[in-house]
Image (cartoon, rainbow, N blue to C red):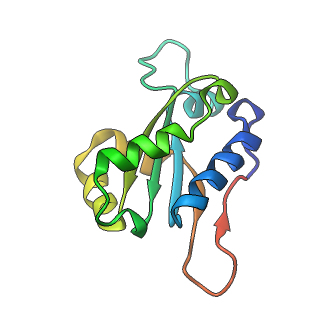
């Protein structure tokens, strides 16, 4: 699946690279109003955040949640992407809980674009859309 150019795939690749240089990612999902727009959502709707990013890494274990979010948010280039992002950073266990209890995380997990997923196998991780 090819990403719509309106979603700035080159900058998304650079963002994932910047994140991956700090923490080994297991999963990265992109959601938000811009993703909905690229899928043909009607213009007359409650937009919510333009971008919502969910990052999952075992390396977040033991790191305060606000520190993770602050660091990951500071790596997002709002000028290149056209807007800021609502960034969520979770360990795998936290993500499983949050996708059940937090509507925004559940929505991104169900309808967002899977940008990256490490299958944990000997082959290269899956890069979806990038």
Query: Residue 39: horizontal and vertical position, in percent?
Result: 62, 34
Asked which quadrant contains residue 41, the reply is top right
The answer to whether 93 appears left or right of 52 in the picture is left
Residue at horizontal 35%, vertical 39%? Answer: 104
Q: In this view, does 91 lie to the left or right of 43?
A: left
Residue 111 in the image: state x and y as whole percent. 48, 45
Compared to 44, does 65 lie above or below?
below
Q: Residue at x 45, y 26 (%)?
A: 49
Front in this rendered view, residue 67 or 92:
67
Query: Which residue of the protein is positioned furthest toward the top in this rendering?
Result: 44
Q: Quadrant of residue 117?
A: bottom right
Q: Can residue 89 be seen in this view?
A: yes
Residue at the image point whose x is 31% and y is 44% from the top: 66
- Relative to 119, say whether 20 is above or below: above
Q: Can residue 53 be seen at all in this image of the molecule?
A: no
Residue 46 vs residue 63, the one in the foreground:
63
**Residue 109 location in percent, x, y?**
43, 51
Q: Which residue lies furthest to the left in this view?
A: 101
Residue at coordinates 29% horizontally, 40% vertically from top-left?
103
């Amino acid at each position: 699946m090819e990403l719509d150019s309106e979603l700035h795939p080159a900058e998304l690749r650079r963002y994932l690279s910047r994140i991956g240089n700090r923490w080994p990612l297991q999963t990265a999902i992109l959601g938000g109003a811009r993703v909905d727009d690229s899928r043909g959502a009607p213009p007359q709707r409650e937009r919510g955040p333009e971008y919502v990013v969910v990052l999952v890494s075992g390396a977040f274990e033991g790191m305060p949640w606000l520190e993770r979010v602050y660091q990951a948010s500071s790596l997002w280039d709002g000028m290149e992407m056209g807007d800021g992002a609502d960034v969520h950073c979770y360990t795998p266990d936290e993500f499983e809980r949050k996708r059940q209890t937090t509507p925004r995380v559940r929505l991104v997990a169900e309808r967002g674009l899977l940008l990256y997923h490490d299958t944990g196998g000997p082959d290269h991780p899956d890069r979806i859309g990038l």
